[in-house]
Image (tube, helix red, strand yellow):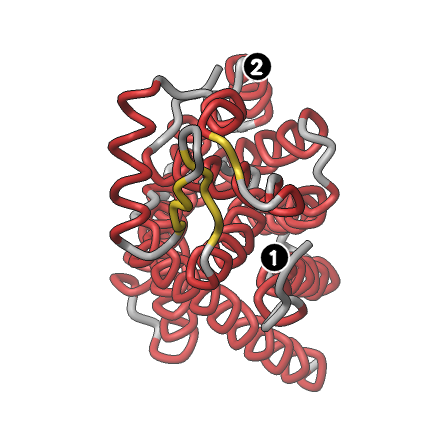
Amino acid sequence: MTYRTQIMIISDILKAVKEESPQGGAKVSSLLRKANIPYNRFTDLTEKMVQNGLIEVIPQERGAIYRLTPKGEEFLESYKKFEEFARAFGLRL
Amino acid sequence: MLALYSSLATISLIVFIAQLLVSLLIAIVSIIGYTSYRSNTLLYLSASFFLIALGVSSQSIYQTNGSAFLQLFGAISETAGYFILAISHVYTVRSSIMTPSLSLSFALMLPSSFLIYTVIKSVSFFLLLYIFAETAIFAIQNKSKAALIPSAGFLLLTFSTYTNLFLNTLTFNLVLIEIAKLLGFLILAAPLTVFVLRRGHKGS
């Protein structure tokens, strides 16, 4: 298991949210599992991501779901390009 | 013979321009990525290619004015660039088979001469070999075709440095060295296509 930086965890959350987009949004339990982080870390990060306009929270009857904003989509696409660029040199972002 | 040396000078100029452009482009793209994502990997990549660009520039100026200081400074800068690139593999990938690949590099690093320049170039050779090994291992372990292409570039640069160190007595070899260097740097530009080919692309 390699060490993940904060930006890597954020990108993992964004990727997980994007994966769940066809279902209308991502639930917390699914994101925790896919991003592989503890709940308290998740709430801290998602709060920052919402403040920065990367994701939006849609309140539901039970809990909430997360959706990717256009800014989040743009961030993720740009991140993937740099990730691929670094990987081409045999490096991880 | 004069015509041969003249064409060699032209090839060297083309190689220098290609090296400078590719190194600067990689360094600039990396620094843009670093400012956006604060990724240490991109910072190392940027520092590495800026130093390589500085090194090749100094060594190219040396060819015109013959300053030994510039030659040495260029060789040190270029080697420092390869060192940062090599060390970034240790910090970011933490390859479990780093020791065998390092041993292989040391085994192939042959003593050449007492000149500091040659010693520095020998270190460059060792570092390039290590970078090639790490990139190839990463490509194989992660089944990444994208990483295989630059590893071929690093292999060509390793070959060019090795030939330059030990077999540069013939004019034919000098042409071969320059061509290998040119191809190596052009191949290293391949990862930049991700920003050109996928510009404006959303989704996937």
Q: Residue at x 67, y 59 (%)?
A: B187
Q: Quadrant of residue B10?
A: bottom right
Dot 1 falls on which chain?
Answer: B
Residue B167 appearing in the image: no
Q: Can see residue A70?
A: yes
Of helix, strand and loop, which one carries label 2? Answer: loop
The percent coordinates of residue B26 (x first, y second) are 47, 62
Q: Which mark is residue B97?
A: 2
Residue at mark 2 to residue at mark 1: CA–CA distance: 25 Å
Q: Are marks 2 and 1 in contact (CB under 8 Å)?
A: no
Answer above or below: position of A39 versus A49. above
Q: Amino acid at mark 2?
A: Ile
Horizontal and vertical percent position of residue A16: 54, 36
Query: Within 10 angstroms of label 2, few (less than 14), some, or many (20 or more) residues?
Result: few
Three-letter amino acid code at disc 1? Pro
Q: Chain of mark 2?
A: B
| Residue located at (51% from left, 13% from top) | B99
Q: Position of residue A24 (x, y in %)?
A: 59, 46
Nearer to us in this view, B21 or B44: B44
- According to the picture, the residue beneath numbered tag 1 turns out to be B191
Is residue A76 or residue B117 the one in the foreground? A76
